[in-house]
Image: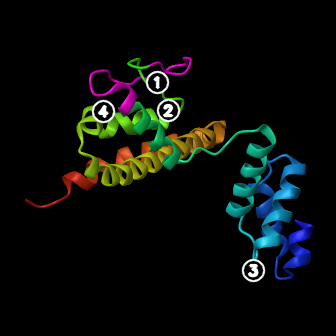
Amino acid sequence: MALIKTCFPQFAPPQAEAYTRMTEDIPEGVLCRAVENVIKISRFMPTVAEIREEAGKILKAATGTRMVLPEEEWGKVLWAIAAVGPYRIPVMEDKDPLETNEFPVWDNETTARAVKKLGWLLLCNSENTALPYLQVQFVKTWRKLDEAERTQRRMENTLQGQRGRQLVSHLAERLTAAAPRRLGGGRK
């Protein structure tokens, strides 16, 4: 946080405490590199979200994990449509590369869910002129499903601590207790 303070003098001690708390789960070396990288490309003081996003990219690069792009996944769907056709429904499982007329293998669960949501038969039986529209729908669906998955993981992480569970449980009890009064108090 000292580097941020040096580059952005308006960075106040309370902000430094908040940034430290919000990034405490990031390994120190990765955090330092992330802060450096974000400062290099930012005109304004970096946000916690920008720092966390950069740290995630650094960790993926360090582990050799590639970012999955929905546009690339659409290419796999097109390939599966051509290789399998409408008579076999693709499944997600660990297998070797496909042979002709085998079940397609989705190596990404979000892709499998997006294909299921759009409908395998619809994808296979569509005219070539509809493919650009279907690609847009697939990418939108894929991104929404991916965001929902990330949100779910974030909520699970939030609730992992006992304090978080107690807070949510207490809030749920209060809302449940207040609901009957709200519903019953209206006029006909």
Is label 1 in a helix, a strand or a loop?
loop
Q: Which residues are magenta?
A: 82-99
Q: Are marks 1 and 3 in contact (CB under 8 Å)?
A: no
Q: Are marks 2 and 1 in contact (CB under 8 Å)?
A: yes
Label 2 sits on residue: 109
Disc 4 residue type (three-letter): Trp
* Callout in the foreground (4, 3): 4
Using residue 11 as the reference point, say whether residue 185 is left or right of it.
Answer: left
Label 4 sits on residue: 120
Is label 3 in a helix, a strand or a loop?
loop
- Any part of residue 14 in sight: no
Upstream in the sequence, badge 4 or badge 2? Answer: 2
Q: Tell me which secondary structure the magenta stretch mostly adopts.
A: loop
Residue 167 x/y as whole percent: 57, 45
Q: CA distance from mark 2 to mark 3?
A: 37 Å
Q: CA distance from mark 1 to mark 3?
A: 44 Å
Upstream in the sequence, badge 4 or badge 3? Answer: 3
Disc 2 residue type (three-letter): Glu
Label 1 sits on residue: 92
Disc 3 residue type (three-letter): Arg
For label 1, the crowd category at 10 Å Cα-Cα, with few meaning under 14, some 14 to 19 and many 20 or more, is some
Q: Are marks 4 and 3 in contact (CB under 8 Å)?
A: no
Q: Are marks 4 and 2 in contact (CB under 8 Å)?
A: no
Residue 40 x/y as whole percent: 82, 71
The residue at 91%/69% (across/down) is 3
Label 3 sits on residue: 43
Residue 84 x/y as whole percent: 36, 25
Disc 1 residue type (three-letter): Met
